[in-house]
Image (spheres, rainbow, N blue to C red):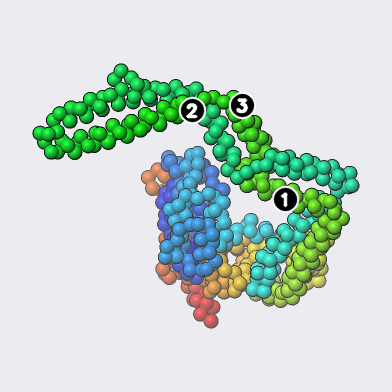
Amino acid sequence: MLISLHVKNLAIIDEIEVDFREGLNILTGETGAGKSIIIGSINMALGGKATTDMIRSGKDYGLVELVFQMEDENVIHKMKQLELPMEDGQIIISRKIMKNRSICKVNGETVTMGIVRELASVLIDIHGQHEHQSLLHKQKHLEILDQFGKGETGEELDKLIKLYKEYQTAKQEYENKNLTQEDRIRELSFMEYEKKEIEQAHIQNGEDEELASRYKRLSNTQLIAEGIQNVYQITADGTSSVSDEIGRAARYLVRISDYDEQLAGYLEQLQNIEEMLGDFNFEIKEYSSQLEFDGESFQEVEERLNMYHGLKAKYGDTIEEIQNYYENLVKKIEEYQDYDLYLEKLKERCEKKEKAYMTCAKKISRVRRKNGKVLSEQIKAALIDLNFLDVQFEVKIKELDRYTENGIDDVEFLISTNPGEEIRPLGKVASGGELSRIMLAIKSVLAGQDAIETLIFDEIDVGISGRTAQKVSEKMAVISKRHQVICITHLPQIAAMADEHYIIEKKVEGTSTVTIIRNLDKEGSIRELARILGGVEITDTVIQSATEIKEMADSIKNT
């Protein structure tokens, strides 16, 4: 779950730190106090849009840091998959926004925005107006149905994606190879030419490297000869060669070695050096005598090396790759020579992959249709709990006229929210306020299956009040028994359900305005409920009403 949020230098926030807890975390405050900035900063840290005008005036950077404490196996697996460090189940995500760039880090390691978004997908689920609007897209309906039944279809869906890709590859190969007689003869002729070219080259492993070494030596023969001559002059043939100088030194030691036994050891070393230098001079002179530019050999090496360069440009960067290309070429020529049999095998392979795909897709479709009926009833019941008094809800499934990696099902949610009204597609019926409640109903149904521990609800109370608001608050309390829930609200019925209640306030410090956030005790929570109820003037009557709302919420939570 999300245990800490740290924001610095963003908009009207100078610096705040919030410690969230399990259950239902409620955030309230006056309009303009900075509630949207709190949720916006979490979104930003998780890879959302960030602009430099969000940096607090007069500051060089803005910073958001989130601390999660996780034990879920899916999260641990994702961290390993992304090769990110993790210790004691803690994940720290930070994003620093500067004038020209931003830096994202996970547990101190700099990462890309894409990695942060991928990690966020298993850490937290944020529901604002945009997420409610996603219900208007049928693809979201399929996703919800599969999430509801993932215990039965999870592994099968992974298998289906793999089978779909294999079928598409086989189908494409078959369609691409279904050539006319003329095209087949032309392609076969070209492959025969390539095969002959490689065979006539008589390539050998390592020969290209050996040729490159010989070419380098032959093309620099003159430079080598001059260098060797200079070395020989220094070591053996000059007026004061190294060989002569060592001989003179040895003779000096001979004359004085009788006077000190230690000098005899030095003399022996020097004589060994003299002998080694003599061998060196003999060998280098022998090498020099054999060093002669052979124009014919050079031409042969150059032509052979050019041949290898040509083969590599066409068939592979290494001899091994050229040999593999040749082997595949031989195989393809055999296939093309008996083309009808080759095509038949491709067709059989394509049909086999299609059959495997369809078997899996139909199995998933049967489970979806069964689960669709169950999900329809459960969502309908949840909608009734949310004060949709005469509601009809249906998960409609029909077969597509094409194959997709998600199967052969077209899934759409249908709804009727008024008596006598025809059941119609969700996107053509529901208003913005209804969409938020429908999403909440779906979330309450999926609460048991949803592995993501932290849910954030923003604008969940749009367009609702009275009894409906009470029903929404009760549903939020139900979800918070299985998940950590963070919710911004303007309604006292929802705020009263808080396990932890935070107030977001705006105050003036000197010449600047800053946002602060405080965790309220029970008395503070009641006073905040009274503010929401009563506006500017908080009377004893309003306090009493707020107390009653809080006590009723506590009673509901404890049942």
First along the sequence among labels 2 and 1: 2
User: Quick check: 218 left or right of 383?
Assistant: left
Measured from the top left, where is residue 486 in percent x and y?
52, 64
- Secondary structure, mark 3, is helix
* Vertical position of residue 380 compared to residue 191: above or below: below
First along the sequence among labels 3 and 1: 3
User: What is the distance, in whole Å, between disc 2 and disc 3 at their CAs?
Assistant: 16 Å
Q: How many marks?
A: 3
User: Quick check: 107 left or right of 279?
Assistant: right
Which numbered tag is attached to residue 306? none
Nearer the camera: disc 3 or disc 1: 3
Amino acid under disc 1:
Asn
Measured from the top left, where is residue 262 in percent x and y?
14, 38
First along the sequence among labels 2 and 3: 2
The crowding category of the residue bearing disc 3, from other C-alpha atoms within 10 Å (few below 14, some 14 to 19, many at least 20), is few
Amino acid under disc 2:
Gln
The residue that appears at 31% across and 22% down in the rendered structure is 241
Quadrant of the rendered structure where residue 415 is? bottom right
Residue under pointer 3: 296
Nearer the camera: disc 2 or disc 1: 2
User: What is the distance, in whole Å, between disc 3 and disc 1 at their CAs?
Assistant: 36 Å
Residue under pointer 2: 290
Front position in the image: 527 or 501:
501
Q: Residue placed farthest to the bottom in the image?
A: 559
Amino acid under disc 3:
Glu
Measured from the top left, where is residue 14 in percent x and y?
42, 49
Q: Are marks 2 and 3 in contact (CB under 8 Å)?
A: no
Residue under pointer 1: 328
User: What is the distance, in whole Å, between disc 2 and disc 1 at their CAs?
Assistant: 46 Å
- Secondary structure, mark 1, is helix
